[in-house]
């Protein structure tokens, strides 16, 4: 029943959003006057949970719908060690936010052997998803939203000053995980590949957590890198392998204020031959210049997102030597920043 309610709510909000964005329909934001009922209070973080087994593993997943800033739900899957904790937690995201809960379930099943190793190491792991990206909105129009007074209805509707973006879903997820009784509130970490790596940077510029691992972070928006018609391309693929080419096409004046607000330690993991390697390197360079706690490593591997190792189609799990080294590099970094004396004792 709870799941049905959530799906109906999301569907209704989607139709409303489509109506407001229809040609000729302009929301009259000017009609919302400063007077009237006070702005609505934020709804406390919470989630709706469906527990299901994970094929090939004896550790189930809590498939969870987490409340977001604009009061719709984002899908995640949480898996944990046995016991009451407190355990540190690591979110795991890959790429763009398509597919909804179907993507979360599929990614959880593929990542299960890797996650089982992380769970044995004493971590709660959360496979995450989020809403789709709105290209260029973050660079050109975004500012963190707030609840507005309601001067029309006579009530206290939740009225937002501007739309919510995908990285704000990651912030909502991190906040929700901190409410779980078995999670160490001072051991909150995030891993993300590609666009998900950029999301960690965007989230960290607005919300403090304990560590981030950005794997090949496609931080073109975060650094305000030119991705328009004049950007270098081969076919439809943008080419920013060379850091000097990126530097000439990035807007440091816009990027540095975002970087300056980051307090979270960040590990950036590049890939030697990646077409965006220059973006990964420049992210590290400018964070270092800003005095941030940032670390750089890079590996030579043919697969985008190589740090995430998956179950093979035949059911086997065979990470190669580079993947094993990259996994240990990432986990050692997270151990150093997320584990504390009480959490270590909890998993022994």
Image: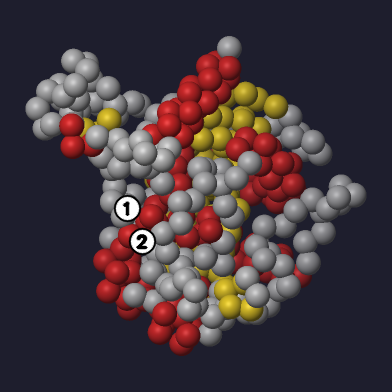
* Left or right: residue 255 compared with residue 192: left
Residue 194 against residue 131 in the figure, above or below = below
Determine which of the numbered discs, if any, sits on residue 62 in the image.
Answer: none
Question: How many marks are shown on the rendered structure?
Answer: 2
Q: Secondary structure at mark 2?
A: helix
Q: Position of residue 12 (x, y in %)?
A: 48, 23
Q: Residue at x 35, y 42 (%)?
A: 163
Q: Residues within 10 Å of mark 1 (few under 14, many from 20)?
A: few
Q: Secondary structure at mark 1?
A: loop
Q: Quadrant of the C terminus?
A: top right
* Left or right: residue 210 compared with residue 87: left
Q: Residue furthest top?
A: 1
Quarter assignment of residue 21:
top left
Q: Mark 2 and 1 residues: CB-CB less than 8 Å, in contact?
A: yes
Quarter assignment of residue 290:
bottom left
Residue 179 against residue 217 in the figure, above or below = above
Q: Residues within 10 Å of mark 2 (few under 14, many from 20)?
A: some
- In three-dimensional space, the C-alpha distance between marks 2 and 1, rounded to whole angstroms, equals 7 Å
From the viewer's side, name the closer residue of 153 and 301: 153
* Left or right: residue 5 compared with residue 208: right
Q: Residue furthest bottom?
A: 244
Q: Which residue is mark 1?
A: 142
Residue 178 appears anywhere in the view: no
Q: Residue at x 58, y 59 (%)?
A: 193
Q: Which residue is mark 2?
A: 139
Residue 242 against residue 75 in the figure, above or below = below
Q: Position of residue 208 (x, y in %)?
A: 34, 51
Colour treatment of the image: secondary structure
From the viewer's side, name the closer residue of 50 and 137: 137
């Amino acid at each position: 029943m709870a799941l049905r309610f959530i799906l109906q709510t999301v569907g209704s909000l989607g139709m409303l959003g489509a109506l407001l964005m229809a040609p000729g329909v302009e929301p009259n934001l000017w009609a919302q006057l400063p007077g009237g009922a006070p702005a609505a209070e934020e709804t406390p973080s919470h989630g709706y949970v469906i527990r299901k087994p994970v094929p090939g593993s004896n550790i189930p997943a809590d498939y969870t719908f987490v409340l977001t800033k604009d009061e719709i739900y984002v899908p995640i899957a949480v898996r944990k060690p046995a016991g009451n904790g407190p355990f540190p937690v690591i979110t795991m995201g890959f790429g763009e936010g398509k597919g909804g809960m179907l993507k979360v379930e599929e990614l959880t099943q593929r990542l299960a052997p890797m996650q089982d190793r992380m769970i044995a190491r004493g971590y709660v792991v959360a496979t995450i998803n989020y809403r789709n990206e709105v290209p260029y909105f973050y660079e050109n129009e975004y500012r963190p939203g707030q609840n507005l007074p309601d001067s029309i209805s006579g009530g206290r509707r939740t009225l937002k000053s501007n739309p919510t973006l995908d990285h704000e879903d990651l912030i909502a997820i991190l906040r929700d995980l901190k409410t779980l009784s078995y999670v160490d509130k001072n051991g909150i970490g995030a891993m993300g590949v590609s666009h998900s790596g950029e999301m960690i940077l965007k989230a960290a510029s607005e919300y403090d957590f304990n560590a981030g691992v950005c794997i090949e972070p496609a931080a073109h928006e975060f650094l305000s890198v030119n991705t328009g018609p004049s950007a270098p391309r081969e076919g439809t693929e943008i080419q920013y392998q060379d850091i000097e080419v990126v530097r000439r096409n990035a807007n440091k004046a816009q990027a540095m204020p975002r970087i300056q607000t980051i307090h979270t330690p960040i590990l950036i993991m590049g890939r030697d031959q990646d077409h965006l390697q220059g973006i990964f390197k420049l992210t590290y360079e400018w964070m270092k210049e800003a005095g941030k706690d940032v670390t750089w490593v890079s590996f030579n591997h043919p697969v985008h997102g190589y740090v995430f190792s998956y179950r093979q189609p035949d059911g086997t799990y065979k990470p190669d030597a580079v993947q094993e080294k990259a996994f240990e590099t990432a986990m050692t970094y997270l151990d150093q920043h997320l584990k504390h004396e009480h959490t270590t004792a909890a998993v022994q």
